[in-house]
Image (cartoon, helix red, strand yellow):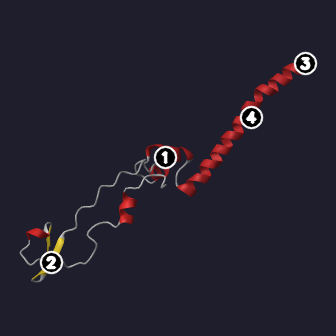
């Protein structure tokens, strides 16, 4: 009985250490599975959720910054009109003589709501 007590104490003291190995393996498996699925490991997901920014170690691997920079709004589109043999572009169409000539390209002048939401999105996208 006196001999089994130290052995039992040793087993009880070593059990948490063995559990630590299993937990580390499980954490590594979760990290490995998270990178292809959410493009970040577990720490990146927690950090991104806390800061609200899109941060990932995958971005570092691609040679980018750790967190995605906040995108500035796009510059205003110039107002381009036809002239003799070329196209003239103006920053302020109100400075043109009246009547204002039609624009060469009929494209959107601003971002759509979906594009603006993507530009200013937070992570995770909730």
Does residue 71 appear to the left or right of 106 in the view shown? Answer: right
Instruction: Count the marks.
Output: 4
Q: Secondary structure at mark 2?
A: strand
Q: For the point 13% across and 66% down, which residue is it?
A: 92
Q: Please, is residue 95 above or below residue 52 in the view? A: below
Question: Do tag 4 and tag 3 residues touch (Cβ < 8 Å)?
Answer: no
Task: Tell me if mark 4 has few (under 14), some (14-19) or many (20+) residues whose alpha carbon lies within 10 angstroms of its own.
Answer: few
In the picture of the structure, the residue carrying the numbered disc 3 is 3
The residue lying at 29 percent from left, 58 percent from top is 73
85 above or below 79?
A: below
Q: Which residue is mark 4?
A: 18
Q: Nearer the viewer, mark 1 or mark 3?
A: 1
Q: Alpha carbon of mark 1 to alpha carbon of mark 3: how far?
A: 53 Å
Q: Earlier in the sequence, mark 1 or mark 3?
A: 3
The residue that disc 1 covers is 49
In 3D space, how far apart are the residues under numbered discs 4 and 1 (Cα atoms)? 32 Å
Check disc 1 and report its element: helix, strand or loop. Answer: helix
The residue that disc 2 covers is 81
* Of callouts 2 and 3, the N-terminal one: 3
**How many C-alpha atoms fall within 10 Å of the one at disc 1: few (<14), some, or many (≥20)?**
some
Q: CA distance from mark 2 to mark 3?
A: 97 Å
Task: Judge from the rendering whether residue 85 lies leftward or rightward of residue 109; answer left or right.
Answer: left
- Mark 2 or 3: the one toward you: 2
* Cα–Cα gap, marks 2 and 4: 75 Å
């Amino acid at each position: 009985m006196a001999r089994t007590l130290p052995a039992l104490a040793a087993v009880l003291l070593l059990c948490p250490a063995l559990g630590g190995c299993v937990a580390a393996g499980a954490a590594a498996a979760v990290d490995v599975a998270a990178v292809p699925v959410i493009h970040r490991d577990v720490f990146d997901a927690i950090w991104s959720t806390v800061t609200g920014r899109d941060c990932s170690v995958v971005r570092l691997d691609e040679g980018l910054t750790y967190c995605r920079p906040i995108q500035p709004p796009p510059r205003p589109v110039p107002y381009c009109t036809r002239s003799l043999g070329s196209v003239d572009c103006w920053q302020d169409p109100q400075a043109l003589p009246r009547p204002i000539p039609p624009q060469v390209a009929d494209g959107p002048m601003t971002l759509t709501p979906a594009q603006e939401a993507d530009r200013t999105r937070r992570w995770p996208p909730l």
